[in-house]
Image (cartoon, coloured by chain):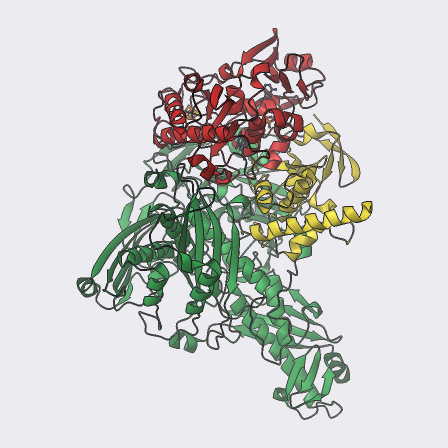
Amino acid sequence: MTYVLNLTINGAAQAIALDDPRVTLLDLLRERLHLTGAKKGCDRGQCGACTVLVDGRRINSCLTLAVSLDGVEITTIEGLAEGETLHPVQQAFIEHDGFQCGFCTPGQIMSAVGLIGEGQAGTDPERIREGMSGNICRCGAYHGIVEAVLDAQATFQDGVKRKTA
Amino acid sequence: MPDTLPFPPRMGSNAGQPLSRRDGPLKVTGAATFAADNHPEGMLYAVPATAAIARGRVTGMNVAAARAHPGVVEVYTPANRPPLMHDPDEKLGLFGMRMEALQNDSVRYAGQPIAFVVAETLEAATEGAALLAPEYAAEPARVTAETGERYTPERVGFGGPLSVGAGDIEAGLAAAAHRLETRFETPDQYHNAMEPHALVAQWDGDKLTLDTPNQAIVMACGLFAAYFGIPAENIHLRSPFLGGGFGSKAVPTGAQILTILAARELGRPVKLALTRQQMFGPVGHRARTWQTLRMGLDGAGKLTALHHHSTGATSSFDDFIEPAAAASRTLYASPAILTTHDGIRLDTGTPGAMRAPGEASGSAALEVAIDEAAEVCGMNPLAFRLANYAEVEPITGKPYSSKALRECYEAGAKAFGWASRPLAPRQMRDEAGMLTGWGMGTAVFHCPMFPASAEAVIRADGTAVIRTSGADMGQGAWTALAQIGAAALGLDPDQVEFESGHSHLPDAGVAGGSGHTASAGQALHNAGEDAVARLAELASTDPASPLYGTGNAGVLARRGRLYARDDESRSESYAEILARAGKPQVEGTGKGARDPASAETYALQAHGAVFAEVKVDPELGQMRVSRMIGAFAAGRIINPKLARSQYLGGMIWGLSFALHEEAIHDRRTGRIVNADFAGYHVPVNADVPEMEAIMIHEDDPHVNVLGVKGVGEIGITGSVGAVANAIWHATGFRPHRFPVRIEDVLPSLS
Amino acid sequence: MKSFDYIRPASIAEAIAAAAEPGTAYLAAGTNLLDLMKGGASRPDRLVDITRLPGLDGVDRLDDGAMRIGTMVRNADLAHDPAFARAYPVVAEALLSGASAQLRNAATVGGNLMQKTRCSYFADPAAACNRRSPGAGCDARQGENRSHAILGWSENCIATHPSDFCVPLAALGAVVEIAGPAGSREVALEDFHLLPDETPERETALERGELVTAIRLPPDAAGFAAHSRYMKLRERTSFAFALVSAAAFLKVEDGIITEARLALGGVAARPWRSKVAEELLKGAALERRTFAEAATAALAEARPSGDNAVKIELARRISIRALLLAAAGTPSRLPALPGSPLSSQYGDLANA
Ligand SMILES: Cc1cc2nc3c(=O)[nH]c(=O)nc-3n(C[C@H](O)[C@H](O)[C@H](O)COP(=O)(O)OP(=O)(O)OC[C@H]3O[C@@H](n4cnc5c(N)ncnc54)[C@H](O)[C@@H]3O)c2cc1C
Ligand code: SF4
Ligand code: FES
Ligand code: FES
């Protein structure tokens, strides 16, 4: 049986024919759509490397069945930058060396974008650490990650202030 | 920015600068291609089935059910596995390990590959493997010290001696005012790089393209080639990025060999990506140790004897004994030092090198033991370490090529506020009432080099390309090596293209042992200098050049121009020199390797001092590291931004060793019961506190031409002890087993 | 993962009809179900996707003062619902102490309630497990069991229920609303998860095809907002299941406890409410001694099921801590590390 899914991925609407309901969102992105930015670190919701935004919320794409997502909007790491202009979170990760091997990085960045959007952590490093704890970094780049989130968040807020001023 | 060494004047100014990673934009946009991101046309998926017993035989598998599953293309078992040109049970080379590639039906550890399913989709291959439902004739698993077989190995680590020492231990103990004997246990730890091992194999006739993360790209080609009877040059191994290696990604493993074999048999590209669970067994680990330290101390708190014995676990079928006692060879002065090892065989996968092999486990024990000794002598742990400071390497008597450990102690202690530490434990509480303790540990790591080679080409437009097969697993090779190459070429890194990360390039050696920057860096440095020399040759022999007659030693290379050393008003750009010579480019080559003379004359070690603050809930025993400062002296720092990340990452590994990591085997079946990231804890962001790494200036003219020691592993050493000693200082409980758990500290609490 | 049929019903009635056949599982966010399917511990033939069913995602105050939470409400949305979090701060804290932000964004109320034990032998199809395959035996009993049950276990199964969310729910007397082939019914949350006894495979009170539609907090669950806390002991600062946890609720008048609720997590196959402890606390002053007595009473029946005697002491201590912190007053803002002793101001309490 074939299931047809209508998904908007990084802004582009797509109708996707899926011949197997077992396919997770992560495997759909990586193996069938060749959007390999999201990574598979555990396939069990335990590491966060597969984090993407579904309707603006960060989730683990490895524990989400693609068939159940008909009609949603998905943002992956590939959809974050505007052309050559990096998203402030991406820029901040580079500046603060918020990664080493880079394998957890797409997940960390999508999680950070989600975290900032949730608006719960503010500028308290402890709340940022807690809010980013669903993303394991085996290289141990946590220090830079927290600095990057703080910095990117400030950039955002500046941007918002300038716009509303 | 921390103090860094200026390069010699002929080099550009970029080395030593905190440049951001050159591969950063690729990594933050998802465009960096890791092995499993590749999708050649027509690709199949491979999934190994793994053993659920730790010893015995596979007596049956439902191959028919697996084959019948829609999408399954082939099922390999020992019954139909096509021949290999090299026996998987024969070791290849210094780093080779015995592996399982379906050579027979025996099982020697849980998690061993016992069959191999290839299918059109990942979903089908995965279910095909599950449908095999193997049956076994199991024998009792031997996964504890009591059931394992004790033996005396021939070597430890990669060919190291079993026993090293000098002086008379028993005499030292007899003469001591205080004697101390203390025992430690460290657990099985698994590398668990974020990127599980992966490989995409594509054949084209007898040519093979491999996308696989690898820490020793050119060497690995030789190893892979041996199994297929093809010349190493026929393999193009691409490993532009490794999602972490930590020692586990240097040599081929069975499942990788089977993937290549399947691709050849089926005539289609095949992809393998291990699951997280499959990372616990066939790809190496840091094995358990049981360590004993015996120390004698005189009335002034000086060591009179230090005997460090470590029993290391290995598999039933291969040898890798953690050289843990080696940690005691070089750190503290004592008239008698003895470091000895023996082994236990267990039904586990074969262990291997994992970030700071030897030193991590060994210094965990040593640094706690040293604190115990300080306690016996009633001394501050820092004062005790200074009292036993080794001015020359203890066993050999060699001078250190450089050793700014005293400065590390001083800077770390000052930044941490160590001076106000009360001597006795259980003296400090924070404002929330948590028991608070401060501990320290000394960090040490040797600085190996591996043979490496490189090329540098200066092009007609004055830019350059440098080439070496280097591997960036996060340490920053793409950036730091380019900085070294650019500096040697007298160019800005932006003007230098860096080709790296695949095997059709000069061999960059092994990215391991913290030796990659030194080794591949030296090769690039020499290649750059060679290219500049050739350019200088052109200019100084050309009467039309302002540099005519300078001779190639008489020039400086800076910002794309050569200058006369004694008269900088005479200069010419690279492009001008090449244009006039009518040459499209000049090429230089270079090699890197340890100078045997310096190794003979000097003790080559990097050092550091780590200070940690730990909070312990006074009733519940929950522990958290709240502050950690490390000060490290590791020769010249090529890029302080990247080096800091390496140090911090290492310190987090130390924290993890002290408080989190442990693979737990079921005693009966030998299966690891916590083989995933939910059960095998590594620190999450909330576990990692305020942390700082201080870089101590160290000018080392002997270690190699660059003065580079290595920063990748030293951060772990010292950190385990610092955290454990802080737990003692908070609670009065002295850890002797890692990781320290709530139930361990509980009896010491109210 | 075994192949399955995927069904997306348009109504609750259709869902229930589709789930009548054996081998069917409801699919909510899938964060637990898919995990088990990938590991092979769960191999359903048919998934009935309930994520689009209408009318299951409300958080509503009912006329009688009860609070109804639809089964499809996401864990994060409930915890961050300002009105809900103000009225039931401990429920929010328990939710936020669980899993990770990503998982909470997906996980549903019903899925959290229905999640399976984290016993590693349950998750490993090669291990013997009575809960997974009745009569197979229990590998945990003589195996690695330091995190297993200390209350309500039997020789047949020593697993615990891992939910944080359910712990305060049990204490507050929540009711599970169920729709099924035979109509609708309700079960007290306390009775919803079954103790193993002879039939560990019977995990909850749900019959085949029944669907959890909502959880309801009764009117008398309100009124504890000023004095309540959830405390969770973990082996990592965040993103770890509880070794033990406790939810404590007090109503206090003039320094005297007029009503108390106490439930423990990570100790049994169900969230463990202790009415004995609650009775002891009622009418008592806010004193550490009373809290210690109540905690001791709550664990009077506890016994180790393996290498886990320490959990009894830890459960006692975490109960005291939760009570002390509840007595000190619910913080005006959730602490940075929800549920963590590491963010609590222990110093204030030593004298409470
Ligand atoms: C890595 C990790 C860490 C975690 N840590 C924690 C933690 O610390 N604390 C904690 O409490 N939880 C934790 N969880 C568990 C998590 O809370 C659950 O996975 C989640 O709540 C399940 O919700 P779901 O919607 O995804 O359920 P699903 O996975 O969709 O379903 C779970 C089960 O419930 C059944 N089901 C779902 N909805 C209904 C319904 N309405 N009626 C009848 N049956 C239904 C399904 O058939 C299935 O059997 C963790 C999970 C993971 C993966
Ligand atoms: S404790 Fe229960 S769930 Fe765990 S193995 Fe035993 S029967 Fe199965
Ligand atoms: S891959 Fe999804 S959480 Fe690890
Ligand atoms: S950067 Fe390597 S795992 Fe995070």
**Compared with residue C22, is residue A31 higher up or lower down, i.e. above or below?**
below
Q: Quadrant of ligand 1?
A: top right
Q: Residue at x 36, y 23 (%)?
A: C302
Q: Which chain is yellow?
A: A
**Compared with residue B560, is residue A38 higher up or lower down, i.e. above or below?**
above
Q: Is residue A162 visible?
A: yes
Give A147 or B525, whichever is nearer the viewer: A147
Q: Which chain is red?
A: C
To which quarter of the image does residue C290 belong?
A: top left
**Compared with residue B20, is residue B13 higher up or lower down, i.e. above or below?**
below
Q: Residue furthest front?
A: C254
Residue B250: % across, % down: 50, 56
Colour of chain B in the rendered structure image: green
Residue C231: % across, % down: 49, 32
Q: Is residue B510 visible?
A: no
Q: Residue furthest top?
A: C182
Q: Residue at x 34, y 34 (%)?
A: B668
To which quarter of the image does residue B487 belong?
A: bottom right
